[in-house]
Amino acid sequence: METKSGLRRPALDPATVAPRTTSGYPTDAMRAVTKGRAKQPLGDALGLTTFGVNLTRLEPGAASSLRHWHLRQDEFVWVLEGHVTLVTDEGEQMLGPGTCAGFPGGTPNGHHLVNRTAEPAVFLEVGDRLPGDGADYPDHDLQVRLTPAGWRYRHRDGTPYD
Amino acid sequence: METKSGLRRPALDPATVAPRTTSGYPTDAMRAVTKGRAKQPLGDALGLTTFGVNLTRLEPGAASSLRHWHLRQDEFVWVLEGHVTLVTDEGEQMLGPGTCAGFPGGTPNGHHLVNRTAEPAVFLEVGDRLPGDGADYPDHDLQVRLTPAGWRYRHRDGTPYD
């Protein structure tokens, strides 16, 4: 595939990958947390299947997700531009360009990144795609599980969201 | 873990991760190709196990590896600084900061990155760690297989290197 910058597969100009700005969270209040988030699925565009790589941009005020931890999936983030606040059970840290973070699957320490600055922030995020994954959300009445029918959001007691 | 920049797990200052400059290739001529390569294993430092993430630096003249393709492992690279030449069966492309490439496992198209500039180049590289992996090297009498005893290099006919 020829791109504007002249790169062709297996190389990729990220500018040619359409961003996704939607959220699958089941309530308006939950979806509002990621308003201003745009994810470009670079790994999918390159034909990768065993892990995902997104180039994610957070406008001021936006968060990467609700605070969560994965049952199995290892996650990695690398900050490219701007500054994000990493929130975990231990508190907050500011991450700038050239710093990173990693979240081994099965570690029950909810995390997310929030852009509390006045400038956009951009980072790479990587996560594996092992079967049997899911995530818990310590600050919300929410869990998600990977089912044969895809990702399904539920209340903490296991009942589905309508 | 407290670091010089004040970041603590699950965040990481890459400057605190010791680089590896050695190569496991079985001959001096093969090892010479990666002279000037330094890899900082960020994923390992963060406790990730299902994929690896290295921050890799190539001095002028150094290559990321011998040209190879993996039987199963998906690979991804993101260029952070400098310029590298991506070599595949289809020829060469120059990749600069903010561009990337991906190599789905099982695609028999040998690839590597070579720094043909006068400045260092730095990139992130990600690869999964599925069982049953191996790699073939189209330009050399070499293959590598992941065995119960670890990675083992062989001649193309399967006989081991001494």
Image (spheres, coloured by chain):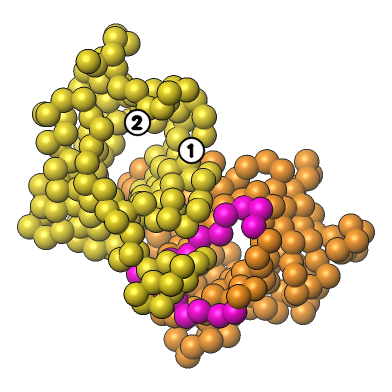
Chain colours: A orange, B yellow
Residue A104 colored in magenta in the image? yes
Image mark 2: chain: B
Give the Cα separation between the discs numbered 2 and 1.
14 Å
Picture residue at 49% right of the left edge, 25% below the top: B132
Rendered position, B51 above or below A23: above
Task: From the top left corner, tell me how far across and down residue B6 is, in percent.
Answer: 41, 78
The amino acid type of the residue labelled 2 equals Trp
Occupied quadrant, residue A142: bottom right
Tell me, yes or no, if residue B20 can be seen here.
Answer: yes
Mark 2 vs 1: CB contact within 8 A: no
Residue B76 colored in magenta in the image? no
Task: From the top left corner, tell me how far across and down residue B64 is, in percent.
Answer: 24, 43
Task: From the top left corner, tell me how far across and down residue B38 is, in percent.
Answer: 23, 51
Q: Which mark is residue B69?
A: 2
**Which residue was labeled with disc 1?**
B129
Q: Secondary structure at mark 1?
A: loop
How many residues crowd around disc 1 within 10 Å: few (fewer than 14), some, or many (20 or more)? some
Q: Secondary structure at mark 2?
A: strand
The residue at the far left in this view is B118
Write down the region rendered in magenta: A91-107
Q: Is residue A131 left or right of residue B99?
A: right
How many residues crowd around disc 2 within 10 Å: few (fewer than 14), some, or many (20 or more)? many
> Of label 2 and label 1, which has the lower sequence position?
2
The amino acid type of the residue labelled 1 equals Arg
